[in-house]
Amino acid sequence: MPGSPGGGQGGQRRKRTAIIVAATVAVILAAGGGVWAVVGGDDGDKEPKAKQSTEPREKKSTEPTKAPEESATPEEEELDPNEIRQDGEAKVLFQAPAPKVTRSGEDVPGFWVLDDYVVKAVQTKIVAYDNSGAEKWNVPLPKTVCAAPTTANDDGKVVVAYEGRKKDECSQLALIDLKTGEKLWDKPAPEGGMFGGGYNSLGMAQSGDAVGLSWFGGSALVSVKDGNPLPVQELTAACSVKGWAGGKALLRAYSCNDGTAKLQKVDPATGKVAWTYPVRKGYEVAKIYSTSPVVIHLVNKDRKSGGLIAVKEGGKERSALDLGGQNYQPDCGMSVFGSSMGSCQGVVASDDTFFLPTALGKSSSSGLTTEIHAFDLNTGKKKWESKTDGRMMSPLRMDGKNLIAYQQPTYDKAGTIVSISPSGGKPQKTVLQLPAATREAENGFYRTRRVFDERGRFYLASERLTGDEEKEKLIMAFGP
């Protein structure tokens, strides 16, 4: 069974085994599980080698926080990690405990970082936490949040989806103002596609004032301003949208029964198609790793890899990345029908370079090792590699010309944020050393959104809860 990088070697708790097995079975059954063919299964699971292929505004909640039924004794209270942290270790800004869940393996999508606080979707609420972990505001929703984009727009507004009237239906949309803590509108998702509604395995991608929706048998483009459908180029009955990716640009991928597939850039303001990239025949887009610059992963009908392709602005091929026979392992989560195309972590793109983590493998000199490889987007050739012994390493973002990466915790080491120079991938300079006192909690995240912001703060936010309330955290925040 594929391994999961979240817990290093031996750091994963045995009680999560059943969940991982269930997730693995779901991916195997998935029609859109093409990410397994080259890179990144559920939270970095290994996969074959690449060469094998308008209502009124609702006010924010002012409900008082309920006191716990019982107070913990001093012996039961968790020690403050800041009181026992060692020299050079990061400060723990706060730890938000995981809420009680109705079942093991409950998804809690949605996490956004603002200037002086963070916002997390927590079941039937959208909650803002300040830098001490205190609740700043919350917005209640009628039912549980079941899908959310990874990015908001420049005004701090984001559309989230919550459960509809039918079982397994993720069909209600709400616009949340992350700056004021208000729900601005709330309405059902529009129907679209071969089967219209259903909204199973809903994927969302937001860019500017538009959010793309895709689900099994349907797709739609919705205005962030009012929740109404936006006109977008309709597809023939023989073609269907596979998914969207957002952020800096809005991309739509679709495939047709005749074996053809295309990638399109869509203008978020008008819904018009800016350009179309025709995918080589017999392949389709499985994942969109970056929307600007554009980097995509192709698979064929048997889910075997067609490689990673960089696409120029205008829809022409820029390069095909020379992956050789290496196994790569970004964190792409699990999308049963492949609709969450742009949700992968552990991949970073600058204007001319793409960074990709390898799977944990053996080194003849020092046992287990992992690497980050940098690829030239103009030529597709590998520029350099950076190695770390004994732990997984995941790219986070660029800091000027340097790459910021997360060295994940192991059974005996806490995580570390490092800066990697473009000069041959050396040296790896420690930017933030996470404390040993929180290593177990850090290691306990199952599926996680990771953010390192410009102020040097690092956040871990759970996107799936295992149900271990005693040890599991919803959010952990660290600072210099």
Image: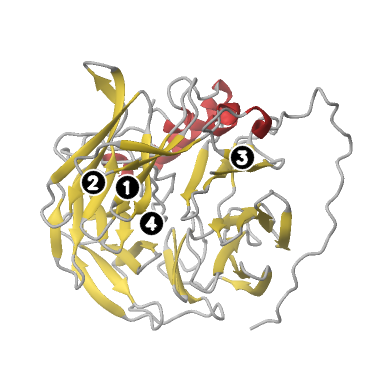
Indicate the position of residue 43 as horizontal and vertical percent values: 43, 38
Horizontal side of residue 238 vs 160, given as left or right:
left
Say whether marks 3 and 4 touch (CB < 8 Å): no
Of pointers 3 and 4, the one earlier in the residue sequence: 3
Helix, strand or loop for disc 3: strand
From this view, report whether residue 111 is shown above or below residue 77: below
Q: Disc 1 marks which amino acid?
A: Leu
> Separation of disc 3 and disc 4 at Cα?
30 Å
Quarter of the image where one finds residue 275: bottom left
Q: Which residue is mark 1?
A: 403
Residue 396 screen position, x and y as percent: 39, 47
Question: Which mark sits nearer the N-terminus, 2 or 1?
Answer: 1
Check the picture and name the quadrant holding the N terminus.
Answer: top left
Q: Does dot 2 land on a helix, a strand or a loop?
A: loop
Question: Which dot marks residue 422?
Answer: 2
Q: How is the image coloured?
A: secondary structure
Q: Is 362 or 54 nearer to us in this picture?
A: 362
What secondary structure is found at the residue carrying circle 1? Answer: strand
Residue 342 appears at what percent x and percent y?
38, 56
Label 3: few (<14), some or many (≥20) within 10 Å?
Answer: many
Judging by the rendered image, the residue that carries numbered circle 3 is 92
Write the residue at 45% across / 39% down: 26
**Circle 4: element type:** loop
Q: Position of residue 38 (x, y in %)?
A: 26, 41
- Cα distance between the residues tagged 1 and 4: 20 Å
The amino acid pointed to by label 4 is Gly
Q: Mark 4 and mark 2: span between their CA atoms?
A: 26 Å
